Amino acid sequence: MDTQSSLKVTSVMHFTHGKRVVGYLRLLRKHLPQQAFMPTFLGVRCMLVLLAFFLPLQQASAQKVATLLHTTSTKAEGNDAFVFGFDRIFVSFKGSINEHAAYKIMVDFNKYFNKSLIARKPADAAASSDFIDKDGETPTALKDAFITFSLPVSAINGFKLSVGKKKTAAGMEFNAPASKLDFVKRGLGQKLIFNRNVGLMLHASGLGERGVGFSAGVYNAGPSNASDIGIVGQDYTLVGQIEINPSKHLHVETYLGHAQTSVAGQETVQLVGLGARLIPLPRLTIKGELMQRDDPNNPAVDGSNAYLQAAYQFSPRFQLAFKLDALDVAGNGKDRTDITIGLNAYVDSKNPHAAKVQINYVASDRSGKDAIQLLFQTVF
């Protein structure tokens, strides 16, 4: 099939598929109660039409569509029953435009569809702020949306420039893929890191024999958990990271963040951290991280976090994990130490993260924070 014919076929696929989805949505709007469905109809329609146009394109280009589903079951201290729900319903689209440009878009349907709760419970309208992400500007449902350019300069071969919304480079555990976490939840330090934000980042990895990498990013004002710090258009959030990988058994990284502010009465926010991963034995992996955040504007996140964890693969399909996690902040009653014991079970030992079950028991020194957590994961 020649290029022109291929384009015609792709266009017909897009039109037919998109028309079918819009028809389904009209039927839903006709038969479902307006008060429960209409507040989210426009946004849901946009997201499903996006799927309708991207899925056929996967067959006509180098684009890849992936889905991550996290179903959870949690029994918190004081509860008599488990609560079932979702942590993530990620759908991502990524691909290459050419040898110098690539892109990624990832949405979280779990965050978006929860908006219907507000429609059914007007008293929860204040919770609508939960649907603005931690950068203070973009919707929570839009996790990633960026373009990455490979710089075509021989002197800096391997350097890339990413522009858009994505994770900042601050935080080793934070930047670990959700599908490959050793525990059901990330640790207590997620309260301190600078989260996803909109900006640009120059980065590279695997440089030289030592596997050196770095990231340097400039973002809009407002780090995680302090989104009112600074003024967008007046201030920046800056994040830098350097890593070294001397062998496949050792990874070490350090990072720092600086959130500027020109607001009278506010102070800049500083973040510094160090993380390492060591594989001393073929089935044993040890990870640790220490971070310090200086944030006089918010005592709840003004302090430090440290964790140490180990995971041992005692059989091809089963892994035991242990974690000690401590948060020490200026806010009264906010300090916390958790001990987590976990068991990870893999359906297919050759592709362990495609389908797995995680079981965690969390023992906390904070009253009411003990929990039994289960996570069921599929990646396809």
Image (spheres, rainbow, N blue to C red):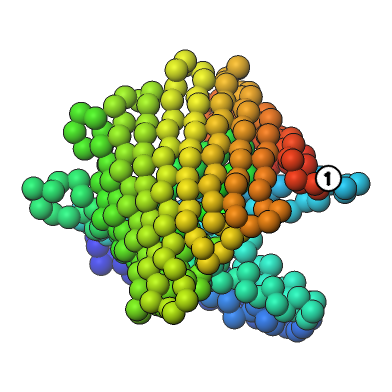
Give the side of residue 103 with respect to residue 279, left or right: left
Give the side of residue 123 with respect to residue 350, left or right: right
Q: Residue at x 34, y 61 (%)?
A: 238
- The quarter of the image holding the C terminus is top right
Front one among 331 and 151: 331
* Residue furthest right in the image: 80
Q: Residue at x 46, y 64 (%)?
A: 223
Q: Quadrant of residue 254?
A: top left
SS type, badge 1: loop
Q: Is residue 55 above or below residue 252?
A: below
Location of residue 151 in the rendering, given as x and y in whole percent from the top left corner = 17, 55
Location of residue 154 in the rendering, given as x and y in whole percent from the top left corner = 8, 48
Q: Is residue 251 above or below residue 82?
A: above
Q: Residue at x 28, y 46 (%)?
A: 214
Q: Quadrant of residue 109?
A: bottom right
The tally of labels here is 1
Q: Is residue 373 above or below residue 44?
A: above
Residue 176 visible? The answer is no
Front one among 314 and 18: 314
Give the side of residue 144 with respect to residue 78, left or right: left
Reading the image, the residue beneath label 1 is 77
Q: Is residue 123 above or below residue 88?
A: below
Dot 1 crowding, Cα within 10 Å, few <14, some 14–19, many 20+: some
Identified by mark 1, the residue type is Glu
Residue 363 visible? The answer is yes
Location of residue 173 in the rendering, given as x and y in whole percent from the top left corner = 49, 43
Q: Residue at x 61, y 40 (%)?
A: 326
- The quarter of the image holding the N terminus is bottom left
